[in-house]
Amino acid sequence: MLEWLRTRHLPRRLAGSPSAMVALFRPTPLPGDRMRYVKQVEGVDTRLTLLWFLEADPRECWEQHFTGLDQAVAEGGLGRVELVAPFVPTVPGTDRYVDQLR
């Protein structure tokens, strides 16, 4: 899946999109010397996280540019998509968007 994302899927998704960049993360297992009560996270070797940095408000471009990833992954038999969600950042030092949180 990582190879498919890097070489095929992400270059096509980025071209002409409102994305400035996409960062791909793979979790790493917790160290062996962790405290006994801290459990190892299951599936760390099979999870990927993509973090998209947009140059536009996601509410304006989400449908056109960010839907369908789950279908593309499923069709290729590469795995499954667990969550695809936009994030609208707040503006530090202001009350912008607070009315929408209540």
Image (tube, rainbow, N blue to C red):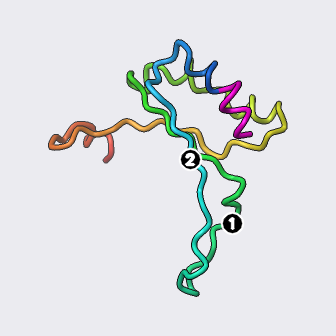
| Quadrant housing residue 3 | top right
Residue 15 lies within the magenta run: no
Characterize the local packing of mark 1: few (<14), some (14-19) or many (20 or more) Cα atoms within 10 angstroms. few
Residue drawn at the location 69% of the way across and 66% of the way down: 42
Magenta stretch: includes residue 8: yes
| Quarter containing the N terminus | top right
In the shown orientation, is residue 40 left or right of residue 76?
A: left
Lower sequence index among marks 2 and 1: 2
Query: Type of residue at label 2?
Result: Phe
Span colored in magenta: 1-9
Amino acid under disc 1? Glu
- Where residue 61 appears, as percent x and y from the top left, is 48, 20
Position of residue 80 in the picture relative to residue 66 (left or right) = right
- Residue at 82% x, 32% y: name it: 76
| Location of residue 21 with respect to 28 vertically, above or below | above
Q: Which mark is residue 89?
A: none
Q: On the image, numbered disc 1 is attached to which residue?
A: 42
* Discs 2/1, front: 2
User: For the view shown, which residue lies furthest in the left direction?
Assistant: 93
Q: Secondary structure at mark 2?
A: strand
Image point (60%, 51%), residue name: 26
Residue that label 2 marks: 25
